[in-house]
Amino acid sequence: MLKIYNTASRKQEVFAPLDPNKVTMYNCGLTVYDRAHIGNLRSFTMADIIRRTLEYLGYKIIQVQNFTDVGHETFTDEQKAKLSQATQSSIEITDTDVGIDRLEKTSKRTGMTPWEVAELYIRLAIQDYQAMNFLEPAHRPRATEHIKEQQDLILKLLAKGYAYITNSAIYYDTNKFEKYWNFAGQKAEDKKVGVRTEIEVDPEKRNPSDFRLWQFNRPDHTMQWDFIIDGVNYRGYPGWHIECSAMAHTYLGHPIDIHTGGADHIAVHHPNEIAQSEPIYGEPYVRYWYHNAFLTVDNKKMGKSLGNAYNLDDIRAKGFDPLDLRYFYLTADFRTPQNFTWQSLKASQVARNKIIRTMKELKQSLSEKDNNQDHVTYQYEEKFKEAIEDSFNMPKALSVLWEVINSEISVKQKLHLIYDFDRVFGLKLSETEPDTIDPDIHKKLLTIIAQRDKAKSKKDFQQADELREKARKLGFELIDTPKGTKYQQII
């Protein structure tokens, strides 16, 4: 029985989708102003693991993961300089109604148009997703492809009195939604917004927590769309939050079974999605909310200014495979903070390579006698299922994989279980092929092993070490086991 930790209830709940045969899932996707970094990739790995787990358990999944290519604003450098340290700690720097669109900011820095910026980073993101072995969602909508749907939702909010128009924007009135503060566990009086005294904001905003649905009267913004309301054209562009509600409803209907995102969305973005959706489409907007905790780097906050917002190119440049990074993510529960270091990634690489070597050895040793079924494998299958049904507990699931690898069950059954478990892990273990060794090298290795065994019997450990090094130069590691010396190719 699958149990999911639900952010909304702050407890683990038995998973019961609205349709017992189909699960709808929306993943807050990438804002395509820059390359996806390893923090983003952890969140998307979580979404992929949830998808794979549900499919492993027999569910049909409709997964939607968006690209934000307009409307997600941040403070300009000049605005950040004006903000006091106290103010910066009390607001969400990455989400503001008074700054600059992230794509516009990249456009000014690079000379590309915002459209070109979006195309570049969407293309790179998809390449990264493929390298990480993410399953392809049913839909990857872009915010700019769904302007009409966002406008229709805004019109409904205006008609129901949940939104209002100022001289520069259309805002959601958070006072009209009684449950607005429930999701993040906040109170209105606890929401500190110190920007008003330091940066010029819209004086017509009714409440500091009100958020922008549509921005107009900004002629310098490149991406603009007509929006006619009662004969008036409020030409402009959407706010960040409205896009997800509109696209989620367009592709998945209402309510959605699972909605994922980073822990940074709990305070602002997801409460806003709930507030603008439930008055229109009924409640709940989402049945199960699942958030990943932050990724730190060397126990520090990750950021471009710190030079530690690594992407897959940085990972490859250090000699790692993207699947080493995927394995690293699996070593911690997604809801707990995880600290990235190059040493921890190396440990994940070593572990993944050991699995690959084991797979190669198993395939090489597979023989007809392994056709007999092993009656004890159900124990491992049940352990694995228990792990993944514990709110997608990947460290626990990995421990079952290693139990199988180190077990005494038959070669055929080991391979069967590893292949089966990798349907969830997504490490491409089924694509591992046994090594083909040149016959001459094979003979040389057997000679080296015989000479080394003789040296060891004479306690000539210096010669034994020299022979081990000789094998390494041929590309093979010698391993002492209770059943004698074995060799494995160095990856």
Image (spheres, rainbow, N blue to C red):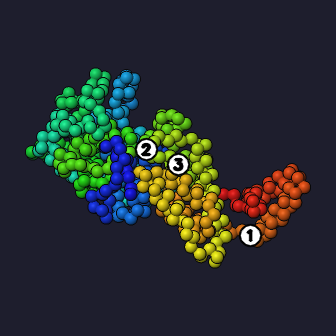
Furthest-left residue in this view = 230
Mark 3 / mark 1, whichever is N-terminal: 3
Residue drawn at point x = 23 percent, y = 49 percent: 284
Mark 3 residue crowding within 10 angstroms, few (<14) / some (14–19) / many (20+): some
Residue drawn at point x = 63 percent, y = 56 percent: 354
Relative to 263, does residue 364 appear above or below in the rendering? Answer: below
Amino acid at pointer 3: Thr
- Left or right of 67: which side holds 18? left
- Left or right of 227: which side holds 368? right
CA distance separating discs 1 and 2: 47 Å
Viewer-closest of 63 and 423:
423
Q: Mark 2 points at which residue?
A: 335
Relative image position of residue 303 (x, y in whole percent): 47, 36
Q: In which quarter of the image is the C terminus?
A: bottom right
Viewer-closest of 296 and 197:
296
Relative to 48, does residue 294 appear above or below in the rendering? Answer: above
Relative image position of residue 293 (x, y in whole percent): 43, 41
Q: Name the residue under label 3.
A: 331
Q: Of helix, strand and loop, which one carries label 1?
A: loop
Mark 2 residue crowding within 10 angstroms, few (<14) / some (14–19) / many (20+): some
- Left or right of 227: which side holds 326? right
CA distance separating discs 3 and 2: 12 Å
Residue drawn at point x = 53 percent, y = 54 percent: 398
